Image: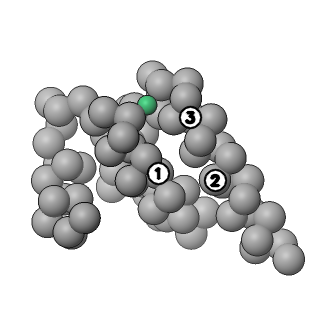
Amino acid sequence: MTVNLLKKLIMTNEYELPCDEVHFLVDQYAEMKLRGDDVEGLMPMVKHHLDMCRDCLEEYEALVAALEFEENL
Ligand SMILES: [Zn+2]
């Protein structure tokens, strides 16, 4: 996935991200969130999807838990 494609996906607000694209982005989203980046401003589509999609939200929460666990090792 190129940065340009990523930007296009993130910037196109009318476009609903499908779950498989959220799968690509959710790692990065979780890492940015843990770094303290403004993910809701930077990746509003992912945020919007996570608010609506239980499956992706669970994946995101599992990722955050895994990343926090690694940080605490
Ligand atoms: Zn989803």
The picture quadrant where one finds residue 20 is top left
Residue sitting nearer the eye, 34 or 17: 17
Marks 2/3: CA–CA distance: 10 Å
Residue 41: x percent and y percent? 35, 50
Q: Label 3 near label 2: C-beta < 8 Å?
A: no
Query: Where is mark 2, residue-wise?
Result: 63
Q: Residues within 10 Å of mark 1 (few under 14, many from 20)?
A: many
Q: Is residue 9 positioned above or below 1 on the image?
A: above
Q: Quadrant holding ligand 1?
A: top left
Mark positioned earlier in the residue sequence (3 or 1): 1
Q: Label 2 near label 1: C-beta < 8 Å?
A: yes
Query: Where is mark 1, residue-wise?
Result: 26
Query: Where is mark 3, residue-wise?
Result: 57
**Observer able to see residue 28:** yes
- Tell me the element at label 3: helix
The picture quadrant where one finds residue 59 is top right
Left or right of 65 in this view: 54? left
Residue drawn 58% across the image and 45% down it: 60
Q: Is mark 3 within 8 Å of ligand 1?
A: yes
Left or right of 15 in this view: 54? right
Residue 38: x percent and y percent? 44, 57
